[in-house]
Image: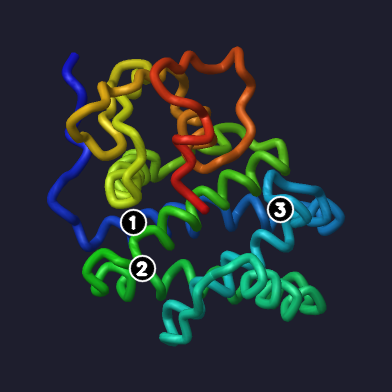
Amino acid sequence: MSAQPAAAIRDPQRPERLLRAEHDGLLPILRRTAEPAFDRPTACPGWSVRDVLAHCSAALIRVVTGRLHAFTPELNEADVAERRGWPLPRLLAELAEGYLTAGPVIGGAGGPLDPVGLGEWVHGGDVRAALGEPLAYASDGFDDACVLLAELTRRRGLPPVEVSLPGRTLALGAAGPGRPAATLRTSPGTMMKIFAGRAAEPGDYELAGATIEELRAFS
């Protein structure tokens, strides 16, 4: 099977579909989860489930209101700290609003904000993993996430990688002269973890021609 192309014609509705998938899939999980579970640690150092959700909510509302900042660790932490005293229902209500309203704004921005949509979906994986939910990084929206990941890895100049997943092959990274494509054989969820910079068990993937560190798409 030949690799799917790393870049595709941009679909402006893709980020909206991805956020809608999180709205429809993650929020029901959160609403049935006991509040103490929101204190569980996540793959994001120093952040609990609640903190990750606060970051997601803040980023989406910033997109909607046009109050974007540089999303540095310091600024992200300030957004999270602002919401730590909120009642959980208030935080989830803001998150739900962001999921539904940020998509059209991201779609209409022409592409620069697409990584926000992908980042929200990846953080949904962080939350699912912390809560012990299945398909943490391969939930609904995976196909749209793959397209956004391909574009992100190309823009950021990651090494070319041919990713072999069960039943499909993806071409990620920036193809160019002088370096043959690396190969990665793994599962969908582990692929997303690797490119998102989350820890992956060595036995869950086979990588040749590149290092794990080189494949990190998110700073």
Q: Position of residue 9 (x, y in %)?
A: 13, 51
Q: Which residue is mark 2?
A: 103
Is residue 25 shown left or right of residue 200?
A: left
Question: Vertical placement of 24 versus 112: above or below?
Answer: above
Between discs 2 and 3, the one toward the N terminus? 3
* Front-most of residues 218 and 119: 218
* Front-most of residues 34 and 167: 167
- Real-space CA distance between mark 1 and mark 3, rounded to the nearest whole angstrom: 23 Å
Q: Amino acid at mark 2?
A: Gly
How crowded pointer 2 is (Cα within 10 Å; few <14, some 14-19, many 20+) is rated as many
Q: Are marks 2 and 1 in contact (CB under 8 Å)?
A: yes
Between discs 2 and 1, the one toward the N terminus? 1
- Real-space CA distance between mark 2 and mark 1, rounded to the nearest whole angstrom: 8 Å
Q: Which residue is mark 3?
A: 32
Q: Quadrant where the N terminus lies?
A: top left
Q: Which residue is mark 1?
A: 17
Please identify the residue farthest to the left as the structure is shown. 9
Q: Amino acid at mark 3?
A: Arg
Q: Residue at x 66, y 59 (%)?
A: 52
The image quadrant that residue 36 belongs to is: bottom right
Please identify the residue farthest to the right as the structure is shown. 36
Q: Residue at x 73, y 55 (%)?
A: 49
Q: Position of residue 200 (x, y in %)?
A: 61, 27
- Determine which of the numbered discs, if any, sits on residue 48 in the image: none
The image quadrant that residue 86 belongs to is: bottom right
- Helix, strand or loop at mark 2: helix
